[in-house]
Image (cartoon, rainbow, N blue to C red):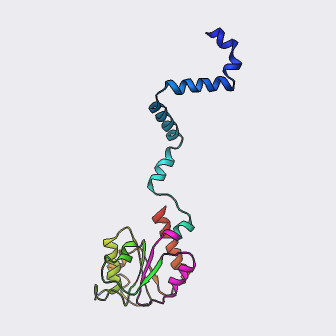
Amino acid sequence: MINWISNNKEWLFGGIGVTIILFIINFFIPKNKKAKNIININNNNNIGKLEENKKSPKRDLGERKKLINILFIDDDTNFKVVKILIKSGWVNTKIKKDIYSLDDRLVKDSHICFVDIQGVANDLFPKDQGLGLAGALKDRYPEKKIIVYSSQRTGDRFHELLKKVDATLSKDADPYEFENLVDNFSKEIFD
């Protein structure tokens, strides 16, 4: 046998010989064992990558802009930041004058909620208004990013509900600050 291999090594290790050997191996090794070996080889080469992909796929800014649902709850439905976000590519940005239920469809579908402290949720939270709404939304939907904002410069800056929300902004902050928050929170949601 060894003499035959040494006499025929050019043919045996050439294209035709390798093809015949692979055919014989493929014919005699059960398919399940081959599949397991291939899977094990791939898993050994990509150990960290598989676990990373299980968490959630990383998304670039363009994808996030299309996927993130942003809701503003504000009695001023002409709030300019909403239009600016939409023009910047955050296409799923909506504004609602008020909500009367924490199970409102727009609230449920949103990833990021901006809540004006004044003039909203008077029926649900007559004492704390928008701040009470923001706290209740964070309790009901802890995975959502809740941001409160207000044009009022005075008030209880140590209110316990301010500790629940993810961020606070002045209503007259630069639109860039609103968009920066959306960008940062969208990374947390999808990365």
At 30% across and 80% down in the image, what residue appears?
A: 101
Compared with 130, 2 (above or below) is above
- Along the line of sight, the residue nearer the viewer: 105 or 88: 105
On screen, residue 31 versus residue 176, left or right, reads left
Residue 143 at x, y = what percent? 38, 67
What range of the chain is rendered magenta? 66-92
On screen, residue 124 versus residue 76, left or right, reads left
Count of numbered tags: 0
Residue 165 at x, y = what percent? 38, 75
- Along the line of sight, the residue nearer the viewer: 43 or 165: 43
Compared with 34, 162 (above or below) is below
Q: Quadrant of residue 3?
A: top right
Residue 78 falls inside the magenta stretch: yes
Residue 88 at x, y = what percent? 57, 77
Q: Quadrant of the N terminus?
A: top right
- Along the line of sight, the residue nearer the viewer: 170 or 113: 113
Residue 23 falls inside the magenta stretch: no
At 64% across and 25% down in the image, what residue appears?
A: 18
At 47% across and 86% down in the image, what residue appears?
A: 171
- Along the line of sight, the residue nearer the viewer: 137 or 10: 10
